[in-house]
Amino acid sequence: MYGCVTWEWGMVETAVCLFWMAFIGGFVYGYNPSKIASIFIKGAKGMTPTALIVGLGATVALILSSAKVLDTVVYGLGNMLSLFPNFLKPPVMLLMNVVVNGFVTPGTGQAAVVMPVMAPLADVAGITRQTAVLAYKFGDGFCNYVVPHASSLMGFLGATGIAYDKWMKFMGKLFGLWMLLGSAILIVAYVIQYT
């Protein structure tokens, strides 16, 4: 935390720091280097499937954006928005963000893809930009608990040994409830012209 706040460390510096903390912790605990390495490999073995899924998800997003396919998908979703009545447009924007989140998981990457389209669409549709941002945040936040290429979700599931299908039996219903509640909040945001 100190390094991130004071020296503006990123992921690489934090990972190196954590590696050295684990290494020094092993020595403090009385392990020799071979024992530390074998424990590290044992821990990494459980996370390998998770790392592969996260890497493949990032690869799909990179391929779609490099091939300019992702922009086409977002443009098509934008055209679909005009088919709905005004009060349903914010919940439809939420659904659009859920679809886009299937391709682009990281919040900043999704914002870079979605918001340049959603902000002008919100202006044309008579929806405040803040409501469009709220739809984006709901879509991004809710999906992080269900998409199989979300790094945090797969990391937690891999570390705890819970299978994805078992997780979805629990989380699928809750995700549906969140979507309904989020849609209701977005309709209220439209009615009050949330800014």
Image (cartoon, rainbow, N blue to C red):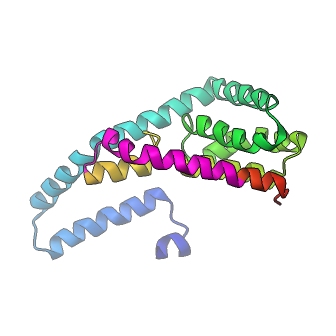
**Would you say 149 lies left or right of 6 here?**
left
Relative image position of residue 101 (x, y in whole percent): 57, 39
Q: Is the magenta stretch mostly helix, strand or loop?
A: helix
Residue in the image at 46% along x and 35% along y: 57
* Magenta stretch contains residue 32: no
Viewer-proximal residue, 45 or 119? Answer: 119
> Is residue 123 in view?
yes
Q: Quick check: 66 above or below 11?
A: above
Q: Quick check: 60 above or below 54?
A: above
Relative image position of residue 59 (x, y in whole percent): 48, 32
Q: Give the range drawn in magenta.
A: 161-185
Residue in the image at 33% along x and 38% along y: 165
Where residue 68 sits, quadrant-wise, is top right
Q: What count of labels does the image hold?
A: 0
Viewer-proximal residue, 164 or 171? Answer: 171
Relative image position of residue 103 (x, y in whole percent): 55, 34
Relative image position of residue 61 (x, y in whole percent): 55, 33
Q: Quadrant of the C terminus?
A: bottom right
Where residue 54 sits, quadrant-wise, is top left
Viewer-proximal residue, 116 or 87? Answer: 87
> Is residue 145 in view?
no
Q: Quick check: 76 above or below 38?
A: above
Where residue 173 sits, quadrant-wise, is top left
**Would you say 188 lies left or right of 98 here?**
right
Viewer-proximal residue, 58 or 86? Answer: 86
Q: Quick check: 100 above or below 130?
A: above
